[in-house]
Image: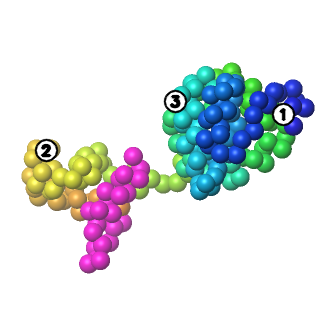
Amino acid sequence: MLAEAGIGVVAQVGTSAELLDAVAGNRPDIAIVDIRMPPSWTDEGLTVADEIHRRFPHVGVLLLSQYVEAEYALKLLHSDEARTGYLLKERVLDITDLVSALERIAAGETVVDPALVSQLLERSKEKNPLDGLTAREREVLSLMAEGFTDRGIATRLYLTQNTVETHTRHIMAKLDLPATRADNRRVHAVLAYLRQT
């Protein structure tokens, strides 16, 4: 398909090691990489894409995936790497879409599959459990995440320990963390905080 569209293909490989060797030897404009590669078929493609960007910054990378994998795509998007793209494999069946993505990546752009954009927009509409916290409660929770006790938080924020305990109770209530003997609410509150930051 690529050759018929007038795009030169300098190598086809099956492993990340072979891919790195091919990029080093051929210095292509773009490497098209499957996110799932041998031997584990998990995220080797993402790992090798990072390596290509690090070792060969002039080479663009187009990652392909069978499914929308938001976690991997977000890693890619948060990397601030130019000349990068993420498309679903079904999108490459339309040679026009594939060639357009390759041209944009070659021009220094970042290309993201529309299905991924839709999924990320849906995620952003989901309510963040921390939205209901006051600024002071967020400060208390942040210090809790750093490992401070109520006494340590009180000292750090120049508050009384009773005030910190009140903030902590409010945090637990707003995050809807029930008091049970089997669960540590502080740990669950910190985990909620870390997931959203």
The amino acid type of the residue labelled 1 equals Leu
Query: Which numbered dot is residue 156?
Result: 2
Q: Which of 13 and 190 lies nearest the eye of the viewer? A: 13
The amino acid type of the residue labelled 3 equals Arg
Q: Position of residue 46 (x, y in %)?
A: 58, 43
In this image, 195 relative to 14: left or right? Answer: left
The residues colored magenta run 176-197
Q: Which residue is mark 1?
A: 2
The residue tagged with tag 3: helix, strand or loop? helix
Q: Which residue is mark 3?
A: 54
Which of pointers 3 and 2 indicates the residue nearer the eye?
3
At 18% from the left and 52% from the top, the residue drawn is 148
Can residue 142 be seen here?
yes
Q: Position of residue 63 (x, y in %)?
A: 66, 40
Q: Residues within 10 Å of mark 2 (few under 14, many from 20)?
A: few
**Mark 3 in CB contact with mark 2 (< 8 angstroms):** no
Query: Which numbered dot is residue 115?
Result: none
